[in-house]
């Protein structure tokens, strides 16, 4: 059985779409919060498991967790910028571009 993809001849008006600034903000915030929770919990679990496996003292464990916050913050900030950028592209009926893994790229090119 063959299926046809039906596309409209012209893009619908912006007011008829479900894209709104509030909806885009909520979607971007949700993706950012998800990455913060997942990478944060993965970092804590990994550092704790390695520290207990190797037998590191608790002070070193806490120091490694403090260092582990840096990549978690990097991922969270980058995800916030990328998610907002993608939401803007989708609202403009454009395709998603290739990600740029720079911390401030999406904030400079707002």
Image (tube, helix red, strand yellow):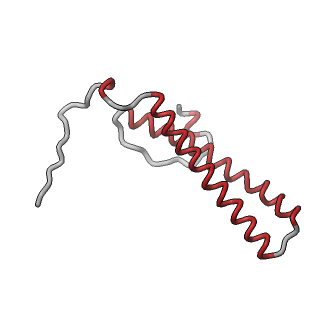
Give me the residue at 45% from left, 33% from top: 23
Give me the residue at 56% from left, 45% from top: 79
Give me the residue at 59% from left, 46% from top: 102
Residue 41 in the image: above or below residue 57: above
Seen as rendered, the residue at the extreme bottom is 54
* Direction from residue 72 to residue 65 in the image, left or right: right
Residue 43 in the image: above or below residue 7: below
| Residue 24 coordinates in the image, percent (x, y) | 46, 34
| Residue 26 coordinates in the image, percent (x, y) | 50, 36
The one of 92 and 30 positioned closer to us in this rendering = 30
* Direction from residue 15 to residue 35 in the image, left or right: right
| Residue 97 coordinates in the image, percent (x, y) | 42, 45
Seen as rendered, the residue at the extreme left is 1
* Figure quadrant of residue 42: bottom right
Give me the residue at 42% from left, 28% from top: 20
* Direction from residue 21 to residue 64 in the image, left or right: right
Total numbered labels? 0
* Figure quadrant of residue 1: bottom left
Residue 19 in the image: above or below residue 2: above
Residue 66 in the image: above or below residue 45: above
| Residue 109 coordinates in the image, percent (x, y) | 53, 33
């Amino acid at each position: 059985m063959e299926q046809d993809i039906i596309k409209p001849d012209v893009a619908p008006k912006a007011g008829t779409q479900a894209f709104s600034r509030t909806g885009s903000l909520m979607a971007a915030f949700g993706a950012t919060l998800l990455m913060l929770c997942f990478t944060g919990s993965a970092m804590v679990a990994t550092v704790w498991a390695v520290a207990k496996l190797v037998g590191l003292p608790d002070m070193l464990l806490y120091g490694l967790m403090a260092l582990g916050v840096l990549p978690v913050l990097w991922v969270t900030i980058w995800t916030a910028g990328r998610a907002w950028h993608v939401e803007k592209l989708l609202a403009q009926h454009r395709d998603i571009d290739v990600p740029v893994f720079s911390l401030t790229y999406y904030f400079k090119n707002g």
